[in-house]
Amino acid sequence: MRNPYRTQRVAFFFLLLATLLIVIPVGLIVVVIIQKGLPAINWQFLSDMPRQGMRAGGIFPAIVGTLYLVSGAILFALPIGLLAAIYLSEYAKDNLLTRIIKLAIVNLAGVPSVVYGLFGLALFVVFLKFGASILAGSLTLGIMILPVIITTSREALESVPQSFREVSLSLGASKWQTIRHIVLPNAIPGILTGTILGLGRAAGETAPILFTVAAFYLPRLPKSIFDQAMALPYHLYVISTQVPNVDEKIRYGTAFVLLTLVLFMNLVAIIIRYKFRKKKKW
Amino acid sequence: MAKILTKNLNLWYSGFHALKGVNSSFEANRITAIIGPSGCGKSTLLRVFNRMNDLIDGVRMEGEVLIDDTNMLSPQADLVVLRKKVGMVFQRPNPFPLSIYENIVFGQKIHAQRVSRDQLDEIVETSLKSVLLWDELKDKLNESALRLSLEQKQRLCIARLIAVKPDVLLMDEPCSTLDPQATSRVEELMRELKNKYTIIIVTHNMQQAARVSDDTGFMLLGELIEFGRTQEIFTVPRDKRTEDYITGRYG
């Protein structure tokens, strides 16, 4: 005779084990990085140039570089992504072509980031002659996060109830007025969430900036968007693998700053989404 | 003179023939009820008058719909102008997730070039007064419209519509989510509004049609079976099918 309770206990055990297997490593990473990185954090570390071949000093140019890159990426990707999302969700007819386009965009989100890096190198650095520059790096990161922005914006737009559109049209609003006054305002929280998630991804990626912007060692701030720049993820990679004898404190301190930046962005996205869900009543 | 005339109106949803040769005439300052069993095409007919059916893929229409002698099915018809003139109240009260005030001035935001705050205030006041909501809501105009009761929401939707200054009010079962008291108050409002507007109401509720309307059309399977004065339709129907429906032997 089978004992249903024993089977159930076994099943529960494996389900719990699987969950723990996911949670524990993430928790450990965070704990280790905080433990080893936090002592390195002080005002000087955050605001000073790296010195002695990055073995001392701070990471200020890398922080600034990452902020430049992320802002550049969003300046490029948000308007284009949003307009594309509006077109796809509101205007495009549901036919084979648009379905292929939508599928392609979803799949683009899964393309390895190093492929975007090579693409950026070929298009922006070499073909358009931007050189290795903040401009080229921002555009590459922007293209990388476009699929995320388009997909989440589209979902946000499509979740606005059809009845709102109907009422607006029935009151004599044109299609564009309906989008502008009714659909967009109600979709903004969802669009923001997607944008910030995209930002977090752009801040953390190394491969796309590797060939397009990142400077190995540049102990000054970039002068223009055609200048190279340091960036946190690449800096972390360099001091962890390319430069011998870097103090562990500096490495973990850099990792801590990067992790904090990305987690902070995700936290903002979560808060926006939470507030939105609480307010939403239709 | 008829406000709205349909001449041999046919409508297809892809392959489905939903309206079959409908000839009808709706007069100004009267309430016309359209009754009939579910799926008979009464909502479809209503949505022809402001061309809301156009939102559905695969809709095809033939014939003429004359509103103030202009054919609204012609390719030159301006849908924005049409929908300003012919407004709609939906089955489910559907205020925007905005404040009461913003709901009412939505039409102004779209149609008027530049309106002063004073003018907007005045529009809000007159619109709310005409649906008898002003006294209840005048002190909470900036609260969310989603917090109102169902009846208040439906009245607000009518006020929002009136602010656009339409000629015709289309009502698609406007009371079906309301309780009997609220329903009778909204019917009272309709009687008041008919002095200024042409009202066409689709309803499942035959008592409502009998109570509130001046004219009645009975539809069955896409055809307008009978159209006439409400009193005659409900007392001496000419068609056997109308009589069967009204006496509850059908549908």
Image: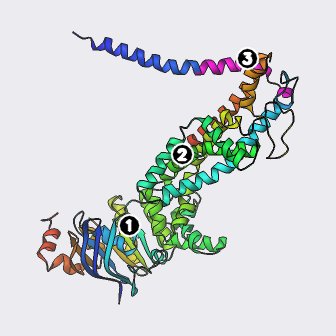
The crowd level at tag 1 (other Cα within 10 Å; few <14, some 14-19, many 20+) is: some
Q: Which residues are magenta?
A: A26-45
Residue beneath disc 2: A152
CB atoms of marks 1 and 3 within 8 Å? no
Mark linked to residue A36: 3
Horizontal and vertical percent position of residue A131: 76, 44
Marked residue chain, label 1: B
Are the residues under marks 2 and 1 on the same chain? Answer: no
Report helix, strand or loop for mark 2. helix
Q: Amino acid under label 3?
A: Lys
The crowd level at tag 2 (other Cα within 10 Å; few <14, some 14-19, many 20+) is: many
With respect to residue B141, does B232 lie above or below? below
Q: Quadrant of residue A200?
A: top right
With respect to residue A12, does B214 lie above or below? below
Marked residue chain, label 3: A
Q: Nearer the viewer, mark 1 or mark 3?
A: 3
Horizontal and vertical percent position of residue A164: 47, 59
Judging depth in this view, the residue of A103 and B203 nearest the camera is A103
CB atoms of marks 2 and 3 within 8 Å? no
Q: Amino acid under label 1?
A: Arg
Report helix, strand or loop for mark 1. helix
Q: Quadrant of residue A276?
A: top right
Residue beneath disc 1: B185
Judging depth in this view, the residue of A80 and B63 nearest the camera is A80
Residue A27 drawn in magenta: yes
Are the residues under marks 2 and 3 on the same chain? Answer: yes
Report helix, strand or loop for mark 3. helix
